[in-house]
Amino acid sequence: MGLKTIATVEIRLIETFLPYNCSTFMIPLSTQIAWLFLIAIPVACIAWTVTHEEVFREPREYCIKQSTQRKTLLGRKFFYVFTCEYCFSHYVTLFILILTNYKLLMDDWRGYLLAGFAIVWVANIYMSLFALIKVDIKREKLQCENEEEKLEKKE
């Protein structure tokens, strides 16, 4: 082995253990964080719509039925994914990561892994906030209807 070959091998070994590949351009952390919160919005929207909204009621009811009546564990778990917003958000995130090539903190497979779990976490915070807001709006609507009924009874 020549001296040049040994130096090349040593550099490759060192690059393997660095937190990211120094030879590539990393996106600034502020931009990565902004993308994290922006990418989580469509993930939350898709996951919530499929698992909760009326437009997907029939397929969701079918999946609920299949998730309880299938004979195999794998079959039950496959259909359960489409009824749970947390579970489904993992698969939506995987699709979005493939579509956008987004990586968080590191410019290799670890960046994809970190990005995947971070997007799921932020998307589920968004869905939890949406659920709280939706419950609050429904409560206010019911209170208004009750007040209107009381006013009608007085008249």
Image (cartoon, rainbow, N blue to C red):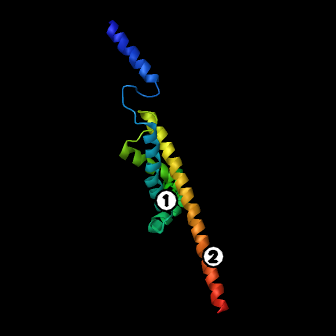
The location of residue 11, given as percent across then percent down, is 39, 17
* Neighbourhood count class around disc 2 (C-alpha, 10 Å): few under 14, some 14–19, many 20 upward: few
**Which residue is drawn at the image coordinates 64% and 87% (left, top)?**
151
Q: Left or right: 147 with respect to 70?
A: right
The location of residue 106, given as percent across then percent down, is 44, 33
In this view, 140 is above or below 79? below
Q: Nearer the viewer, residue 112 or 132?
A: 132
Q: How many marks?
A: 2
Query: Which image quadrant for residue 133?
Result: bottom right
Q: Nearer the viewer, residue 86 or 78?
A: 86
Q: Secondary structure at mark 1?
A: helix
Q: Secondary structure at mark 2?
A: helix
Give the farthest residue toward the bottom: 155
Amino acid type at circle 2 is Gln
**Which residue is drawn at the image coordinates 52% and 49% (left, top)?**
122
Query: Which image quadrant for residue 131?
Result: bottom right
Residue ID for mark 2: 143
Amino acid type at circle 1 is Trp
* Neighbourhood count class around disc 1 (C-alpha, 10 Å): few under 14, some 14–19, many 20 upward: many
Q: Earlier in the sequence, mark 2 or mark 1?
A: 1
The location of residue 46, given as percent across then percent down, is 44, 57
Which quarter of the image is occupied by the N terminus? Answer: top left
Q: Nearer the viewer, residue 82 or 111?
A: 111
Which quarter of the image is occupied by the C terminus? Answer: bottom right
Marks 2 and 1 sit apart, C-alpha to C-alpha, by 26 Å
Residue 72 visible, this angle: no
**Which mark, residue 113?**
none
**Which residue is drawn at the image coordinates 48% and 55% (left, top)?**
44
The location of residue 144, given as percent across then percent down, is 61, 78
Q: Are marks 2 and 1 in contact (CB under 8 Å)?
A: no
Residue ID for mark 1: 48
The mark lying in front, picked from 2 and 1, is 2
